[in-house]
């Protein structure tokens, strides 16, 4: 399960908080709006009642016994009320007898006292304002609360509805702000990801947020320490190899002289074994020196051209004794094998290591095959031999430094193909391994871009 990024976590937390605040705001506004609407209905009913009372005082001296004038008065008040369509009235006697009233308003019982109250009828809630108009006359001015609320909301500004847009707009603004705020961190991550494994320069801290500066500073201190260790390692390897060359050469000369001066066969054989071990040490020192100076980050001069075919034949001639000793047949097909824009010295080392490895690890009475192929913007060098069986996993480890195939007693320290891999990379090329045929042998292929 992959971990969420810092940006994702911030967006999630901000969205959660914004949503909670929005819900709280909606609930608060809805509650206050309900109180506001109820109060507004009461204000309208009270205003209508006052208007009715004022008009009644005017017409009371001339009011007919059948109270028709009072009914007309209430109808007129209903026409000018802001609650038109949801407004109604009922007029009762002091004993609860209904005189007249709006036909769409249910018949309510006469209240015990004046004032406001709610009454439910036919599944709807009605807001009622009861007032005594005269000694024997009660008037109930009423409004359907649901309909009145709808009517009032239609006349209000769209501000309450704008609350519905606050949540998505705020979340989008938070996402945009978080993306802007975390952009330096993302750029820092991309810079580190694009770096070469051997690039140990300090990271830039100019645009890094203050909260991340201690981390970047610690990383830069670590890079500086690693750079010192790498430089110390390179110097140590190079100095050690140089210091070992002179005594090894002297030991080899002394052993050769001792062999020529000795008449004792047993001593001669012992000196020969010692000379072979010294030769292996000399070879290891040379490989270490070569590996130490192949720095992938150092600029490489690629101003030469190299004829792979000529280099191959030169190396085969140098290994003639080994070819004869193991009765190895060679097959060389290197047409159109000129490599341009290269470092010829390194190409010679690459070919030498491939040829020496193929001969050294080939089975007796077998063969070594060397071919080149040009085309599709690349030059391919393939060196194959018949060697001891190995698995595909072991084959892919051959490029690792100091790796040796288990059970192989041939001389070597496991640096030859590691050096080939590094030289190929310095030229923008690749090193690949495969079986020579079927599941047998080994084919090493180096591809150079042209």
Image (cartoon, rainbow, N blue to C red):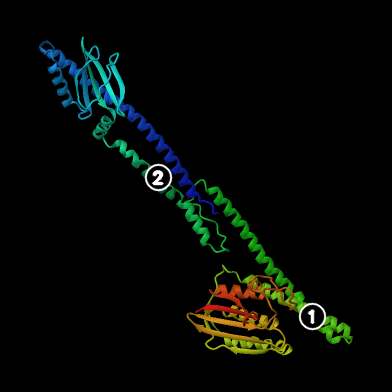
- Relative to 15, is 200 above or below? below
Disc 2 secondary structure class: helix
Disc 1 secondary structure class: helix
Q: Nearer the viewer, residue 294 or 322?
A: 322
Q: Position of residue 321 (x, y in %)?
A: 72, 88
Q: Which residue is mark 1?
A: 275
Residue that sits furthest to the right in the current view: 264
Q: Is residue 450 left or right of residue 249?
A: left
- Relative to 75, is 318 above or below? below
- Residue lying at 46% horizontally and 46% vertically, measured from the top left: 12
Q: Which residue is mark 2?
A: 171
- Relative to 85, is 219 above or below? below
Q: Is residue 415 left or right of residue 204?
A: right
Q: Position of residue 409 (x, y in %)?
A: 75, 77
Q: Position of residue 262 (x, y in %)?
A: 87, 85
Judge the density around disc 2: few (<14), some (14-19), many (≥20) Cα neighbours within 10 Å.
some
Circles 1 and 2 in contact, beta carbons < 8 Å? no
Q: Position of residue 287 (x, y in %)?
A: 68, 75
Labels in figure, total: 2
- Relative to 132, is 19 above or below? below
Distance of label 1 from label 2 (alpha carbons):
79 Å
Position of the N terminus by quadrant: bottom right
- Residue lying at 47% horizontally and 55% vertically, measured from the top left: 187
Q: Nearer the viewer, residue 240 or 209?
A: 209
């Amino acid at each position: 399960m992959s971990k969420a990024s810092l940006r994702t976590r911030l967006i999630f937390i901000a969205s959660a908080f914004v949503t909670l605040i929005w819900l709280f705001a909606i609930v608060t506004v809805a509650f206050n709006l309900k109180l506001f609407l109820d109060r507004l209905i009461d204000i309208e009913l009270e205003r209508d009642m006052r208007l009715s009372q004022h008009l009644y005082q005017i017409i009371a001296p001339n009011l007919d016994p059948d109270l028709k004038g009072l009914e007309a008065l209430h109808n007129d008040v209903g026409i000018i009320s802001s609650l038109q369509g949801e407004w109604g009235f009922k007029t009762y006697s002091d004993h609860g007898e209904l005189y007249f009233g709006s036909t769409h308003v249910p018949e309510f019982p006469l209240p015990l006292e004046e004032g406001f109250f709610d009454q439910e009828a036919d599944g709807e809630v009605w807001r009622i304002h009861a007032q005594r108009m005269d000694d024997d006359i009660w008037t109930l001015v009423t409004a359907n609360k649901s309909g009145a609320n709808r009517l009032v909301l239609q006349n209000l500004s769209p501000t309450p509805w704008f609350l519905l847009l606050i949540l998505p707009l705020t979340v989008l603004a938070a996402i945009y702000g978080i993306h802007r705020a975390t952009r330096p961190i993302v750029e820092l991550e991309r810079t580190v990801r694009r770096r070469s494994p051997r690039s140990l320069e300090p990271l830039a801290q100019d645009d890094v947020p203050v909260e991340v500066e201690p981390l970047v500073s610690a990383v830069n201190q670590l890079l500086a320490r690693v750079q010192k260790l790498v430089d110390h390692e390179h110097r140590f390897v190079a100095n050690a190899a140089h210091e070992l060359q002179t005594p090894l050469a002297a030991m080899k000369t002394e052993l050769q002289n001792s062999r020529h001066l000795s008449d004792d066969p047993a001593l001669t054989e012992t000196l020969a074994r010692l000379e072979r071990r010294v030769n292996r040490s000399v070879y290891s020192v040379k490989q270490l020196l070569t590996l130490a100076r192949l720095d992938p980050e150092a600029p490489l001069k690629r101003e030469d051209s190299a004829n792979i075919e000529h280099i191959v034949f030169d190396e085969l001639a140098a290994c003639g004794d080994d070819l004869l000793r193991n009765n190895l047949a060679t097959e060389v097909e290197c047409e159109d094998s000129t490599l341009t824009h290269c470092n010829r010295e390194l190409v010679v080392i690459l070919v030498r290591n491939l040829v020496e490895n193929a001969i050294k690890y080939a089975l007796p009475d077998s063969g070594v095959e060397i071919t080149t192929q040009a085309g599709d913007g690349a030059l391919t060098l393939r060196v194959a031999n018949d060697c001891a069986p190995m698995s595909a996993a072991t084959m892919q480890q051959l490029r690792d430094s100091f790796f040796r195939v288990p059970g192989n007693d041939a001389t070597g320290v496991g640096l030859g193909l590691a050096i080939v891999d590094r030289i190929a990379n310095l030229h923008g090329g690749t090193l690949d391994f495969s079986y020579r045929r079927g599941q047998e042998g080994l084919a090493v292929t180096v591809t150079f871009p042209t």
